[in-house]
Amino acid sequence: MSNEIRLAFAHPRERSEAMAGPDPMDRISLRDHIVDVDIGAFQTERGQMQRVCFNVVVEVRPLSDPIDDDVDRILSYDRVTEAIAHELAAERLNLLETLAERVADRILLEPQAMRAFVRIEKLDRGPGALGVEIVRSRKTALAPVDIGTEEDAPHPRVVFLSNSAIAAPHLTGWIDQLEQDGIPAIFCIGAPDGEAPRTGHAMTQRRIDLLAIEMNAWVLASKDPRCVVVNTRTELDWAMKNGQICVWAPSKIVLDAVDGPAPHPRDPVALAAWFAGEMQARKLWIIGGTPPETAPVPVRILPDDQARL
């Protein structure tokens, strides 16, 4: 076996040594760190925990002063496992490649870290291990995103519209008012009137009920061009920062949530309340509907025949 082939399957530590430059750096490594993860692009992987193995090597800038046996002066192993745990908790992902990129980027935010070797493998998808390995250096790592303080983050107004509110003659006037006050607005809706198909199977029924809501989201979008249907957190964050009024299509965020919402899609007001909490909304407005039993944000109830919000 050639040395290149051997290194391709060797532990990332050996690869880091082989790629060392004239001034080798110190290294810390994490070997065979196995976590149960819900990850994967295939439908059969959704909702199924599978073992995922992490091997990570971080090249760190050597300290010029004595360590003095002080843990605060080195890059702790805990920071590597915390980077993994943080990215696993952020959202459900489809691709190992995405997870590896995010883990490497988070590790490289540490001031001592100069280069990260990240190998991630699925252990339960076949007779062998299926995985990816990436190498990222500080000079090529994504720049840290300045998320600001909690006070700086957008706190939208989430507005639930019943079907009667969607059809109301005041809809355009409500959107005018929301657009003028400068507070980001996100519309939530339920399924259209009428019975959705029934499958008798919980997982498929949940998908159908979520898709019914999304179908109705496009109905609302057809009423006014200012209403843009969005389904990802990235789009929502961009929209809130750029004054765009959104209609939430819930499937992706609901299905990708690490701790999914307790409300069923057939209880759209409760689902909207859960979403308002996730978005740290300042208030949930319900037009033409009844309040949920509990809500993580203040709730205001309005009739669907009221012209002024």
Image: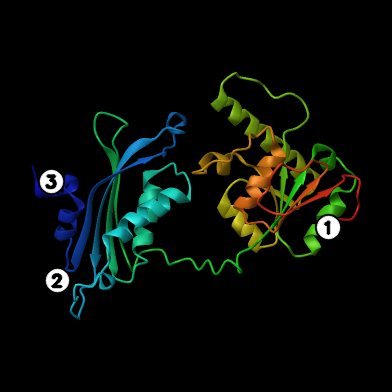
Earlier along the polypeptide chain: callout 1 or callout 3? 3
Tag 2 residue = 22
Q: Nearer the viewer, residue 256 or 71?
A: 71
Residue type at tag 2? Pro
Determine the residue positioned at 40% across, 55% down: 102
Earlier along the polypeptide chain: callout 2 or callout 1? 2
Q: CA distance from mark 1 to mark 3?
A: 65 Å
Q: Secondary structure at mark 3?
A: helix
Residue type at tag 1? Asp
Q: Nearer the viewer, mark 1 or mark 3?
A: 1
Point out residue 133 in the picture as x, y percentages from the top left corner.
28, 49
Residue type at tag 3? Arg
Tag 3 residue = 6
Q: Is residue 46 above or below residue 88?
A: above
> Circle 1: is it few (<14), some (14-19), or many (20+) Cα within 10 Å?
few
Q: Nearer the viewer, mark 2 or mark 1?
A: 1
> Circle 3: is it few (<14), some (14-19), or many (20+) Cα within 10 Å?
few
Tag 1 residue = 176
> Circle 2: is it few (<14), some (14-19), or many (20+) Cα within 10 Å?
few
Point out residue 197 in the picture as x, y percentages from the top left corner.
67, 21
Q: Is residue 205 above or below residue 302?
A: above
Q: Are marks 3 and 2 in contact (CB under 8 Å)?
A: no
